[in-house]
Image (tube, grey):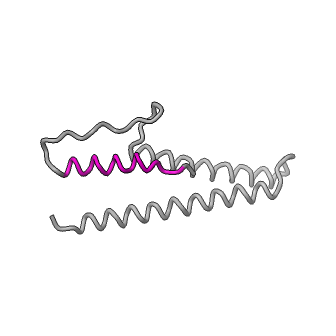
């Protein structure tokens, strides 16, 4: 799984703070790194796609091993399966933290 770009996340938090400070301020444009936008939604989508890709690869390797395809070894299948499992667990924990943060923000009094 790709590491989160902390600068991109911080810029998103700053943009949200700027919007909260008043209606007259315009939000900054999303940061761009190497021609690719690094806003939170694109980072989240990229992470989900990466986890999905790992799970699809692990499933394909497992099916190929079951069919007896030459060149597919059990250690490769197990390693791919564990990578997919760990990345999914990490994504689930990130989701839980985001939901918890959302609930904390929504319960704040203004």
Which residue occupies the foreground of this view, 30 or 72?
A: 30
Residue extending furthest toward the front: 7
Q: Residue at x 69, y 53 (%)?
A: 58
Residue 18 among those drawn in magenta = yes
What range is drawn magenta here? 3-20
- x then y, percent, for residue 107: 24, 69
Number of labels in the image equals 0
Residue 110 among those drawn in magenta = no
Q: Residue at x 51, y 50 (%)?
A: 48
For this view, does 24 lie left or right of residue 71?
left
- x then y, percent, for residue 59: 69, 53
- x then y, percent, for residue 90: 54, 61
Above-or-below relation of 109 to 23: below
For this view, does 56 lie left or right of residue 5?
right
Q: Residue at x 60, y 47 (%)?
A: 53
Q: Could you tell me which quadrant the C terminus lies in? A: bottom left
Q: Main secondary structure of the magenta part?
A: helix
- x then y, percent, for residue 34: 48, 32
Above-or-below relation of 36 to 86: above
Q: Residue at x 24, y 41 (%)?
A: 27
For this view, does 74 lie left or right of residue 90?
right
């Amino acid at each position: 799984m790709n590491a989160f770009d902390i600068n991109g996340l911080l810029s998103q938090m700053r943009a949200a703070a700027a919007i909260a400070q008043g209606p007259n301020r315009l939000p900054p444009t999303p940061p761009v790194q190497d021609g690719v936008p690094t806003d939170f939604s694109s980072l989240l989508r990229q992470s989900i796609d990466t986890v999905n890709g790992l799970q699809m690869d692990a499933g394909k390797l497992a099916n190929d091993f079951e069919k007896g395809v030459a060149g597919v070894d059990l250690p490769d299948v197990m390693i791919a399966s564990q990578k997919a499992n760990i990345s999914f667990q990490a994504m689930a924990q990130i989701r839980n933290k985001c939901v918890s943060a959302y609930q904390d923000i929504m319960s704040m009094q203004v």
